Image (cartoon, rainbow, N blue to C red):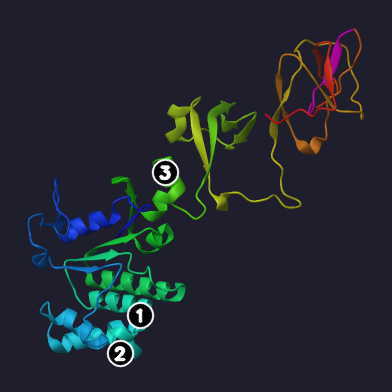
Amino acid sequence: MLAVVGPSGSGKTTALRAVAGLQPVRGGRVLVAGRDVTAVPVSQRDISMVFRSTTLVPFLDVAANLARSAGAFGVPEPEAAQRVVSRSRLLGLARLLPRMPGTLSAGESGMTGIGRTLVRTPRAFLFDEPLAHLDPVERARARRTIVDAVRAAAVGALYVTHDQAEAMAVGDRLAVLHEGRIRQVDRPRRVYDAPVDTFVADFVGDGGIGLLPARLVTSDGVAGFRVGERTIPLWGPVPAALVPHVGSLLLLGFRAEDVTEAGPGATRPRWRYRCPCAASSGPAATPSSGPRSACRGRPTARAWSPASRAAHRCGRGSGPSWCWTPGAPTSSTRRRAGPCCIRNRRVRPN
């Protein structure tokens, strides 16, 4: 089953109508079960279609509506009756079989329309938002029945919906349409995990996706995404697919389930901090428990662990200032800084 999803006006129903023969095709071909039916009349295409709005024969009860659909396409009467019973049970229509269409609700009429389609075994099934009028419980049941019936018939099916969650649930493959063009066709999980563009990334998935402009960078063989003044590490080398994009500006996507709030006792990673101090050596300086400061000057990067509780301290006065490098193995590592410091300012993560 190929699920076709996209926003309103993207061309989903138009594509379905073209396959059914209800929409003229100006270019290309329509193949059903390997047979070119582009010029074949609708009545000879052997396609079973469910429309969004179902029209039942008003003077026949539900059972007769279902049986008539099967019998009209050459199904023997005993087999048609058996299919009516089995499909009505699966769809929860057994209690409705003696009812007339005029006494049915919109949801019940929709379910009857689905049943009328599934009693047949055509060359292909076409579903145009068949569950639009159903409540959540009926939607889930009808969805399972549709999938099982299509697989049992071993024929192809197109399932059109604007609900991307429903499309991912029913489709073996997923096609995303936008403004009359197919943006991506692949397995639903593949479309979710590896969207081809920002439209697909944002459209497929509950809540969309968070997008951040980022630059792919490397340091000592470790890759990361530079976002503003911070780097989000990948904790490993650059993935092979991203090697050509090192140094390039990219869009970094976050799904909601990939981001969690760190709880108590969470392991804190080692971040690379910048020590904005000049690189010349000078006399020893002693760390202070006083206000933490950062010195202006040429940046020097140092690995720093938040657990080390190391701090910067810069001297003040008319002479040179001194900066103690956080995370150093001993207090003997010093960096001479410029003459000015900014007190009470923490060094920001790199």
User: From where the camera sits, is residue 194 visible?
Assistant: no
Q: Residue furthest top?
A: 319
Q: What is the crowding at mark 2: few (fewer than 14 residues within 10 Å), some, or many (at least 20)?
A: some
Tell me the residue that label 1 is attached to: 108
Name the residue type under label 2.
Answer: Arg
Residue 199 shows which numbered tag? 3
Please, is residue 336 above or below residue 51 in the view?
above
Q: In this image, 266 relative to 73: left or right?
A: right
- Where is residue 74? Give x, y as percent: 10, 79
Please, is residue 225 above or below residue 178 in the view?
above
| Residue at disc 1, secondary structure | helix
Q: What is the crowding at mark 1: few (fewer than 14 residues within 10 Å), some, or many (at least 20)?
A: some
Q: Nearer the viewer, residue 152 or 58?
A: 58
Name the residue type under label 3.
Answer: Phe
Which quadrant does the C terminus fall into?
A: top right
- Where is residue 7? Give x, y as percent: 38, 52
| Residue at disc 3, secondary structure | helix
At horizontal 21% and vertical 81% (from top left) the residue drawn is: 57
| Residue at disc 2, secondary structure | loop
At horizontal 72% and vertical 42% (from top left) the residue drawn is: 268
Asked where in the image residue 12 lies, by quadrant, the reply is: bottom left
User: From where the camera sits, is residue 310 visible?
Assistant: yes
In 3D space, how far apart are the residues under numbered discs 3 and 2 (Cα atoms)? Answer: 46 Å
Tell me the residue that label 2 is attached to: 99
Name the residue type under label 1.
Answer: Glu
The residue mark sitting in front, 1 or 3, is 1
